[in-house]
Amino acid sequence: MSEIKIEITGLRKSFGQVEVLSGVDQRIEAGEVVCVIGPSGSGKSTLLRCVNLLEQPTGGRIVVDGIELTDPDTDIDAARTRIGMVFQQFNLFTHLSVLDNLTVAQRKVLGRSRDEAESVARQNLERVGLADRATAMPAQLSGGQQQRVGIARALAMNPDVMLFDEPTSALDPELVGDVLGVMRRLADEGMTMLVVTHEMQFAREVADRVLFMDGGVIVEQGDPAEVIGAPKQERTRGFLARVL
Ligand code: ADP
Ligand code: MG
């Protein structure tokens, strides 16, 4: 039997009068890599932000690793530590070294000792190919390196699932490959990943499933070769014709 890591049922989200998510259902198994594609404004970021309750859903149910985040009795801060999030803008602490960026939350949120946090930080910098940049400040790194630090920082919390919101969209084209390479390795290691991306090649090669969103709903989903290579829905075809 497969283990469901992320279960989203009837998810709705409105901002004021505007409904941005209009009933999203999704079950993501342990180790699955699911890529979300779709036009700007279709609700992709809002979906990810609801999955770790950075946005409070208007309706529906979200269960991550067996914990119902939408249950008012759930300790959201504790539950959220199990969910790693990587943003388009790297959101590093610019006044802290790379190493300190990776240790702060481990110490404050997980209560790890300085020694343990630094050891975990170094292991994860190694994992993203930046073991030699621990003492650097973020501004001394390229955008691609900063994003890999962002990924290492999320991994240092030992998350059960990783959410990526257009992690390469802010990068110069020549820096995209390194970040996608790190994500590909993570996928190979069996991490459960929900990835909003415009990198169709990555989605085709790495995703187990692709979701096409438009207007706050999942319009089409399935095998990447089918959704990207032979879309059934007119809206998917129109979108792909614009981006490919
Ligand atoms: P995507 O990531 O697919 O581009 P978003 O989830 O960011 O789409 O946004 C979906 C819609 O929700 C957009 O119309 C956007 O303007 C709106 N929206 C997103 N966040 C907010 C917010 N905090 N307040 C009001 N409207 C928002
Ligand atoms: Mg977005």
Image (cartoon, rainbow, N blue to C red):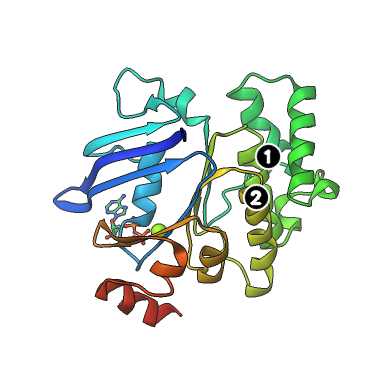
Taking the image as shown, residue 184 lies to the left or right of residue 217, namely right
Q: Determine whether the residue tagged by mark 1 lies in a helix, strand or loop.
A: helix
Question: Amino acid under label 2?
Answer: Asp
The disc, 2 or 1, on the residue closer to the chain's N-terminal end is 1
What is the spatial separation of the Cα atoms under label 2 and label 1, in whole angstroms? 26 Å
Q: Mark 1 points at which residue?
A: 101
Indicate the position of residue 60 as horizontal and vertical percent values: 23, 37
Q: Would you say residue 94 is visible in this rendering?
A: no
Q: Which residue is drawn at 48% across and 62% down?
A: 197
Mark 1 closeness class: few <14, some 14–19, many ≥20 residues within 10 Å: many
Residue 123: image location, x then y, percent? 78, 37
Secondary element under disc 2, as helix, strand or loop, is helix
Disc number for residue 24: none
Which residue lies at the image location 76% right of the left edge and 23% below the top edge?
A: 116
Q: In which quarter of the image is residue 219?
A: bottom left
Disc 1 marks which amino acid? Asn
Q: How crowded is mark 2: few (under 14 residues within 10 Å), some or many (20 or more)?
A: few
The answer to whether residue 186 is visible is yes
The x and y percentages for residue 104 are 65, 31
Numbered marks: total: 2
Q: Does any atom of ligand 2 lie closer than 8 Å to the CB of label 2?
A: no
The image quadrant of residue 76 is: top left
Vertically, is 14 above or below 178? above
Task: Tell me the tag on residue 188.
Answer: 2
